[in-house]
Amino acid sequence: MSTGSEQVPASFLPARGEPQKGNTAQSPKGPVVLWSHISLLPDDVIERLEKEEKAKGARKGVRPPPLDLAEIAQIKAAEQSFADSTSAIQIVPRKSRPVILQTGSLGPAMKAFDKCSRDSLRDWGIDPDLDDQIVRPVWPINVRSWFSPSDYPEAMRRTGDEADIKLRLLVDAAGRPTKCTVVSRFKEKSFDKVVCDVVMRRARLEPAELADGTKVPSYYYNHVIFRMQ
């Protein structure tokens, strides 16, 4: 597969819907397309969720109201139904030259992915059944204050190295970080160490909550970008 574009659109068949764009990259075996996020939902549901996210973004620094567990259950059901009905994926590496991958129903794959996700939570020490009942996820307090320019590793600054670090933070029922894990890998581990060291020392968080206000252990994801200016 070859393409002259940095992005490649993909659609799920037979539903089609709005194409979801992936980024092209090179692997030892040739060109690949990477999708960091795929929404297995009808377009109207995706549009509604995007509007809700934009509304949250307009209230930066303000913890969102509790989630509606019934609505979350409906979204999960819609996602599984969409996956069940999907039998192929169409990608368009070049204009007017689509490639159709006959996958069969994605329903079993979605169920396997959900099981894998729940198993991962158990591995982290999180009860997935309790996690299902969380209406207020972990909330970071003034996250921009956690890092400063002086946290840039000096050796990496001298060589001009940059990095995008994604991390997972386990948070106890009191809002204290208990474990930091880098979930993206960079060739220079100095960045990984700095990120976790800083977060474990400086992170301030409000713990996850159930509908009755009970605080429970959970987790938090963040993305730290090191850029030279």
Image (cartoon, grey):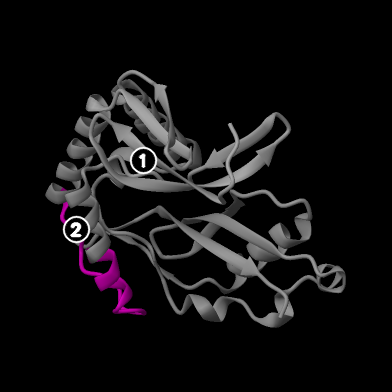
**Mark 1: which amino acid?**
Asp
Above or below, comparing residue 3 to residue 67 in the picture = above
Q: Which numbered disc, 1 or 2, marks the residue that appears first in the sequence?
A: 2
Residue at 77% over, 60% down: 190
Image quarter where the C terminus lies is bottom right
Numbered tag placed on residue 223 in the rendering: none
User: Front-most of 218 and 29?
Assistant: 29
- Residue lying furthest left: 70
The answer, for residue 210, to whether it is visible in the render is no
Above or below, comparing residue 222 to residue 125 in the picture = below
Q: Which residue is mark 2?
A: 48
Element type at mark 1 = loop
Q: CA distance from mark 1 to mark 2?
A: 30 Å
Q: Which residue is mark 1?
A: 127
- Horizontal and vertical percent position of residue 62: 31, 78
Residues in magenta? 52-69
Q: Nearer the viewer, mark 1 or mark 2?
A: 2
